[in-house]
C-alpha cells in the first residue's frame, strides 16, 4: 500500500468505527542467518473436482518449500510451485464458481510428478489447512506423500483459544487484518505461510511452533464400540464422531487423556467398567492418511 493510502487507513482505524483489511504481502525472508538447527517444510494446497477423496481428482496443486528452525521460526521461502491438471471428466460448475478454474484453463495441462516428488523428497513436514483431505488426495496421485510427516494447520493450532472464532483460512486472515485471493492453491499457501510465521494473539507463541508441537505428539483414537444408541447425544456433545465403516463412535485424544475418557465412558455411557475399549495410536507419519484413517 502506498504511503498516502496507509495514512488514510490509519486515520480510519483510529476512529474506532472502521477496520481496514490489507492485502497480504509476499513473505519477507529473515535477514539474520539461523542460529539453530533448520529443516525443510512444505505448505501444500489442492483444488479438486469435489470432496470425495476416493473419486475426485486434483486439478491444481500449490506448494511452498521453506526453511524453518527448531523454534518454529520461518527463515525463508526456497521454492514455490503451482500447476494445473486436466481431470478425466469436466470440472463441475460449482467447483468453477468457487475456484474460477475452467475446463479451458486445464485443457492439456498436467502436473509434473517428478517435480512434486523432488520438492517433497527431503521435507520434514507437510502442512495443509485441511490435512485429512489434502493428504488423502495427494497420496492417491503421489505415493511419496504417504511416507512424509503431516500437520493440519486448521485443527492442530489452538486458534479458538487464541481468540479466533472461525477456523477457515479466510476468517483467520480477516482476524489478523488481511485478505487474499482465496480458493486458488498457491494463494492459499501464501496466506497460510504468513499466518504460521506470526505470533498467536494470546500466548504470543509462533503459530508454526504450536503446530509442530501438537503434530509431534502421538494421539489415540478411542472407540466407544457397543455404546447404547440413547447415549449418542452425550457422545456428540463430547466431540465424538461417528464411523460409518466401524459402526461406532470415536474420539481422538492425547495419550494423557485416555484414562480420563475411559472413566467418563464407564460412568456416563456404559454404566459399567470398560477397561478394554479398542484404541488406535497415530503419529504425524500416519495421521490423516487413508491407510490408517478409514473413518473419513
Image (cartoon, helix red, strand yellow):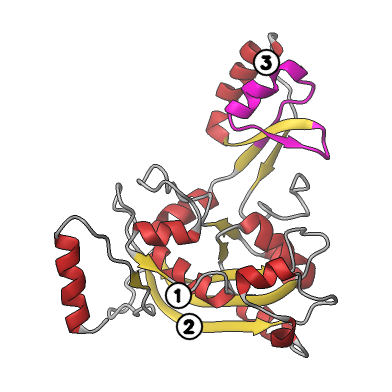
Q: Residue at x 17, y 82 (%)?
A: 4
Residue occupying the point 71% across, 13% down:
270
Residue 126 lies in magenta, yes or no?
no
Residue 148: horizontal and vertical position, in percent? 65, 64
Residue pointed to by mark 1? 67
Q: In the image, which residues are magenta?
A: 221-247
Give the SS element for disc 1: strand
> Is residue 71 visible in the rendered structure shown here?
no
Please say whether residue 229 is one of the residues in the magenta stretch: yes
- Marked residue nearer the N-terminal end (1 or 3): 1
Q: Say left or right for 57 vs 237.
A: right
Q: Which residue is mark 2?
A: 78
Residue at 23%, 84% in the rendered image: 2
Dot 3 or dot 2: first in sequence order is 2
How far from the left and from the top, in percent, is residue 174?
38, 60
Report helix, strand or loop for mark 3: helix
| C-alpha distance separating marks 1 and 3 | 47 Å
User: Quick one: label 1 or label 2, which is nearer the N terminus?
Assistant: 1
Closer to us: 279 or 156? 156
Q: Residues within 10 Å of mark 2 (few under 14, many from 20)?
A: some
Q: Which residue is mark 3?
A: 269
In this picture, residue 124 sits left or right of residue 206? right
Amino acid at each position: 500500500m502506498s504511503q498516502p493510502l496507509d495514512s488514510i487507513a490509519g486515520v480510519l482505524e483510529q476512529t474506532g468505527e472502521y477496520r481496514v483489511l490489507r492485502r497480504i504481502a509476499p513473505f519477507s525472508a529473515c535477514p539474520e542467518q539461523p542460529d539453530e538447527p533448520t529443516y525443510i517444510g512444505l505448505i501444500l494446497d489442492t483444488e479438486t473436482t469435489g470432496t470425495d477423496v476416493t473419486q475426485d481428482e486434483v486439478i491444481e496443486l500449490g506448494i511452498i518449500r521453506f526453511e524453518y528452525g527448531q523454534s518454529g521460526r520461518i527463515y525463508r521461502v526456497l521454492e514455490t510451485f503451482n500447476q494445473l491438471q486436466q481431470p478425466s471428466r469436466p470440472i463441475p460448475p460449482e467447483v468453477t464458481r468457487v475456484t474460477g478454474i475452467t475446463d479451458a484453463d486445464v485443457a492439456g495441462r498436467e502436473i509434473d510428478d517428478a517435480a512434486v516428488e523432488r520438492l517433497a523428497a527431503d521435507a520434514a513436514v507437510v502442512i495443509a489447512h485441511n490435512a485429512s483431505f489434502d493428504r488423502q488426495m495427494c497420496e492417491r496421485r503421489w505415493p511419496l506423500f504417504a511416507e512424509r510427516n503431516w500437520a493440519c494447520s486448521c485443527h492442530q493450532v489452538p486458534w479458538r483459544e487464541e481468540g479466533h472464532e472461525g477456523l477457515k483460512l479466510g476468517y483467520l486472515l480477516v482476524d489478523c487484518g488481511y485478505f487474499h485471493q482465496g480458493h486458488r492453491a498457491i494463494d492459499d499457501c501464501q496466506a497460510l505461510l504468513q499466518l504460521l510465521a506470526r505470533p498467536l494473539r494470546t500466548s504470543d507463541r509462533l503459530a508454526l511452533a504450536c503446530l509442530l508441537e501438537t503434530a509431534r505428539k502421538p494421539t489415540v483414537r478411542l472407540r466407544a464400540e457397543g455404546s447404547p444408541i440413547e447415549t449418542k447425544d452425550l457422545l456428540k456433545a463430547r466431540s465424538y464422531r461417528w464411523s460409518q465403516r466401524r459402526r461406532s463412535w470415536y474420539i481422538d485424544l492425547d495419550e494423557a487423556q485416555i484414562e480420563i475418557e475411559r472413566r467418563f465412558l464407564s460412568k456416563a455411557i456404559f454404566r459399567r467398567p470398560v477397561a478394554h475399549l479398542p484404541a488406535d495410536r497415530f503419529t504425524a507419519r500416519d495421521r490423516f492418511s487413508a491407510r490408517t484413517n478409514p473413518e473419513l
